[in-house]
Each structure stands twice: as C-alpha cells, then as structure tokens.
Image: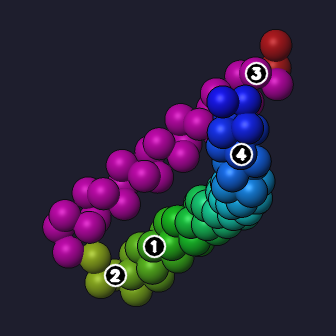
C-alpha cells in the first residue's frame, strides 16, 4: 500500500513542477501586459491632450480669420470667458 501512495506522489511531482513553471510564465506575461497597458494609457492621455490643444488652435485660427459659424463662435466665447475666469482666480491667489 505505501508503495502505491509513493508512486502516486512521484507521478504528481513532475506535473506540479510543470504547472508551477507555467504559472510563473503567466505571471511574467501578466506583468508585461500590465506595463504595456499603463504605457498605452499614458500615451492615450498625451494624445488626447495634444488633440485638445490642436482643436483650440483651430478655433483660434478660425476666429482670427472670422470663419466661425454661430455655434463655434458661442463655444469660442465660452472658452475665452473660462480662461479669463481661471486667470482671475490665479491672480486672486497670487494677491493673497
């Protein structure tokens, strides 16, 4: 009887080692994927910021050439007013 248990344990050990190797590889792959994901998220934020900047530049160019339609003009004026309010807040903080 003890021989069969010992034999059973010996037959499981290689399978367990293989399973642990696969687990370690999967953990490593998972970390690489997480790092890639973080890099993609960071790049996405950079690109979104760049798009917003370019959209603002387009609006400014349109405004300077007088080619804004009604909705664009209203949006542009709101953006300008928002920038002015932010500047006023900054100036108020500096004066304190």
Q: Earlier in the sequence, mark 1 or mark 4?
A: 4
**Nearest the eye: 83 or 49:** 49
Looking at the image, do the residues carrying marks 3 and 1 touch, with CB atoms under 8 Å apart? Answer: no
Examine the structure image and report whether residue 10 is included in the region drawn in magenta.
no
Residue 43 screen position, x and y as percent:
64, 68
Residue assigned mark 4: 7
Badge 2 density bin: few <14, some 14–19, many ≥20, Cα 10 Å: few
Residue 78 screen position, x and y as percent:
36, 49
Residue 80 screen position, x and y as percent:
46, 52
Q: CA distance from mark 3 to mark 1?
A: 29 Å
Q: CA distance from mark 3 to mark 4?
A: 78 Å
On residue 93, the disc is: 3
Residue drawn at x 54%, y 46% is 83
Looking at the image, do the residues carrying marks 1 and 4 touch, with CB atoms under 8 Å apart? Answer: no
Residue 28 screen position, x and y as percent:
75, 59
Examine the structure image and report whether residue 91 is included in the region drawn in magenta.
yes
Element under disc 3: helix
Which of discs 3 and 1 lies nearer the camera? The answer is 1
Residue drawn at x 82%, y 25% is 94
Q: CA distance from mark 1 to mark 2?
A: 16 Å
């Amino acid at each position: 009887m003890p021989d069969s248990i010992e034999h059973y344990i010996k037959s499981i050990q290689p399978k367990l080692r293989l399973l642990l190797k696969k687990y370690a590889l999967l953990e490593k792959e998972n970390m690489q994927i997480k790092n890639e994901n973080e890099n993609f998220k960071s790049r996405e934020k950079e690109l979104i910021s760049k798009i917003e900047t370019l959209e603002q530049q387009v609006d400014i160019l349109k405004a300077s050439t007088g080619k804004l339609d009604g909705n664009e003009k209203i949006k542009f004026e709101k953006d300008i007013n928002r920038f002015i309010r932010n500047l006023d807040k900054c100036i108020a903080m500096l004066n304190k």
